[in-house]
Image: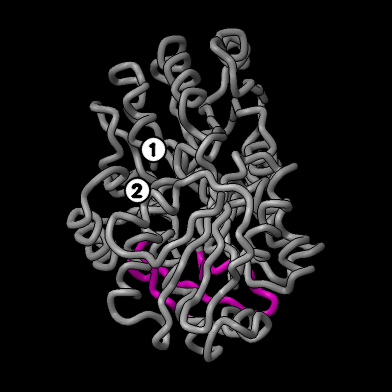
Amino acid sequence: MKRTTTLTGLAVASLLLSACSGADGGGASDDEIVLGIVTDTSGGASAYAPYTAVGMEIAIDEINEAGGIDGKLVRVITKNDGSDTTQTPTIARRLIDDGAQVLILNSGSASAIASKVVCVEEDILCVAPTNLSASIVEAPDNENIYILGPTSAGIGEAFAQGMNAAGYKKLAVIADDVATIQDYASAMMAQLEEAGIEPVALEKVATDASDASAQIARIKDADPDVVLVMSLGGQTEALIQNGLFQAMPDMPRFSLASIGNQPETWDLATAGALEGVVFAGSIDTTNKRTTEFEKLLTTRGGNNSELTAYGPQGYDVIKLIEQAITAADGAEDREAVQKAFESISDYKPHYGQDEYTISFGADKHVGADGSCGLVLAQFDAQDRPTKTWPEFQPTC
């Protein structure tokens, strides 16, 4: 059963996160704008998708409470793909059949990649607000899909610069054995090796693993200067970080954005196990737009109301889509909405460093204008990400 409603108050939270299937064929009426959201409530991306959903909720509530977009209220249809890429294209098409005029991809990067052909064939604007994979916006079938950025390659470049600044030369990598992470790994490793960082160990961990001691033992034997953990977060990340902390307590560690934006994962760590871990963050508390969003989040309250990078990214994707639909004089003409979206320039988002901006173009489907959408952050002794890494920060 598909659930649809006009979005007001807390009702949208359950709507955005619900696992829906099927269709009622209702389509979009003349007095509404319909957004279709592919989400993940049961798979690897379910650890962070709810935080993005909260940001989207806040933005949609603001729009509807102000009278909508050019007088039309925003309605959402959402369906769960469980990060199962064999299901994603079918789910995307069902959302369009049900009246979606824009698709938001709030699942794993592999799901966004699997959606590309649908976006092109249906000539519909598709935006993945939190996904990092550069493969999403690479040919073929990249004409209609966009990410906010930075990409996994950009994170690899920032990590390479940071590791060089800190004097790290020998790198060990331990990663989730899932499609999204393996795609990240190839892009990031290319940047790291190009910068002269030597990989001395490359290990994989199954997502359902209960033990990673063998992989960690091999990493220890390789005698690296630094270890990079790549995962979707959750139990797998905690398993790896706890194991590394026990076996190699003084080893510098890096990780992706996932761990820094998942409060539930922090609580799975052994006390003190995350201290010093550097991750690819996007929260800079000196950015006044970030603090403005945090106030909105605090006022909202409820579940998933802790500030992470995913909340502002969810908020910004709705504001960007609103800007495009307004410029296109409505959402009925899919091509006009697409063209309006790729004409957006110098948007000031609610995450990243203060000078960070987002722009798109016909040949620019990654919104990031430079690298300062990244903030390399670090965990404290209480396993909370509370400070920036002093060795290096990306600049625009």
Q: Are marks 1 and 2 in contact (CB under 8 Å)?
A: yes
Q: Secondary structure at mark 2?
A: loop
Q: Is residue 91 left or right of residue 132?
A: right
Quick check: is 82 in the magenta stretch? no
Q: Nearer the viewer, residue 32 or 262?
A: 32
Q: Measured from the top left, where is residue 210 in percent x and y?
A: 54, 11
Q: Judge whether residue 362 is colored magenta.
A: yes
Q: Position of residue 154 (x, y in %)?
A: 57, 55
Please tell me which residue is depicted at 60% across the width and 50% down the height of the picture.
Answer: 152
- Location of residue 140 (image quadrant): bottom right
Task: Give the side of residue 90 with respect to residue 288, left or right.
Answer: right
Q: Quadrant of residue 290?
A: bottom left
Residue 196 in view: no
Q: Distance of mark 1 from mark 2, alpha carbons? A: 8 Å
Q: Amino acid at mark 2?
A: Thr
The local crowd at label 2, few if under 14, some if 14 to 19, many if 20 or more residues have their Cα within 10 Å, is many
Residue segment shown in magenta: 346-370
Towards the viewer: 349 or 50: 50
Q: Earlier in the sequence, mark 1 or mark 2?
A: 1
The residue beneath circle 2 is: 308
- In the image, 294 versus 303, the foreground residue is 303
Compared with 214, 14 (above or below) is below
**x 73%, y 60%: residue:** 116
**With respect to residue 126, does 159 lie above or below?**
above
- Which disc, if any, is residue 262? 1
